[in-house]
Image: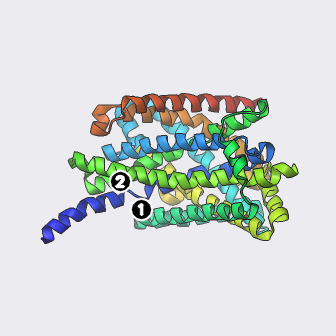
Amino acid sequence: MTATIATARKPAVRRALMYGPAFVAAIAYVDPGNFATNFAAGSRYGYLLLWVIIAGNLMALLVQMLSAKLGLATGRDLPQLCRQRFPRPVVVGLWVQAELVAMATDLAEVIGGAIALNLLFGIPLSIGGLITGAVAFALLGSESRGHRRFEMAVAGLLLVIVAGFVFNTILAGVDLSGITGGTVPRFSGSESVVLATGILGATLMPHVIYLHSSLTSTRSRHIEAGRHAGDHLSMIKSVRRDVLLSLGLAGLANAAMLVIAARLFHPAGQSADTLSDVHSGLGSMLGTGAALAFAIALLASGFASSSVGTYAGQIIMAGFLNRSLPLALRRGITLAPALVVLFMGVDPTHALVWSQVVLSFGIPFALVPLIALTSNRTVMGPLANRPLTTVVACAVATLVSALNLLLIVQIVLG
């Protein structure tokens, strides 16, 4: 009887181990860059572009599910599989652009954390950048004692972000008719198309495509999932629920940002082009509690997303080159560009925009290998993509890559 109970518990334990990785990936979808874009969209066009956030979240669900499935099916992450299956020059090129993506990611996250510390405590941006980097390093330190500690810490910060915007949504009130109208795809002039392009183009984050596959590959190796096809199919359901829950929360936070701006800033004609504008606007319209909730959510985003970006940098180098660096050195490498920007006094909003250009450039270099590998039955076995999944994924990759190219052109040309 004891043996029967132990056998019954084993699959349940395996499925439980699959929960958590998607919460780490979800942080990338509520990073400081998302804060700025979503509030700008709501303040300028009301609820008009709410459907764009919903569409972007659906695309993110598909891509992160593919990344998680790749790690689960193979026991390896995306960079490792690229190194094993692609020519050496291709692998080196993928590594170089992925490192640039990791640095650009940290630039945005550290700046966001520095702005939050400035809003909360009046700390200069340069000092705030150092503090953000130190806190992110401490968060990463918890990973050395097991993935679960790090994932729980990041999940907790994600819940802080969501709670902050749920609180502010309640204070602002909800216009159900406006929200319903915002779910209908439409535009209002060329400028709304440009902003929609920015929202969709910056939705997918290449560094967490690499990272998510690594987190699930670790689970796969730990539970020896590859020995039983039935276990694969059972655990893929757990992975799917993990992705739906975590990215659903991230999508809720993104939608709440736009809804709050549409409810408050748009009718008043008030600017929300910078994070400081948003903070001051919330304070004047809803009170200090709302401004405080926004700043705390921004701080949680900066801390969590910076640690996730550095963690992804470790995965990128180890996977593509089969090399690794001490955590402190890796933290210093990814942190350096952000500190240079802050100490030079560069406008933080301008720096955030240019970091998104680099991130946009990296999207197809992560998406195309991901789709190619997850569609390959030799690599994936029974978890290979169905033809319809591959078609939809290719359509998403084509759309996002085209939008990112358009976004880069628009930003470069001013």
Q: Position of residue 115 (x, y in %)?
A: 74, 59
Report x, y in % for residue 312. Answer: 50, 50
| Secondary element type, mark 1 | helix
Q: Residues within 10 Å of mark 1 (few under 14, many from 20)?
A: some
Q: What residue is drawn where x is 59% and y is 40%? A: 55
The N terminus - image quarter: bottom left
In this view, the residue in front, 303 or 134, is 303
Q: Which of these two is toward me, 191 or 380?
A: 191
Q: Amino acid at mark 2?
A: Thr
The type of residue carrying mark 1 is His
Q: Earlier in the sequence, mark 1 or mark 2?
A: 1
Q: Is residue 203 visible?
A: yes
Per the image, label 2 sits on a secondary structure element best described as helix
Structural distance between the alpha carbons of marks 1 and 2: 9 Å
Q: Dot 2, crowdedness within 10 Å: few (<14), some or many (≥20)?
A: some
According to the image, label 2 marks what residue?
A: 218
Is 403 placed above or below 71 here? above
Disc 1 to disc 2: CB gap under 8 Å: yes
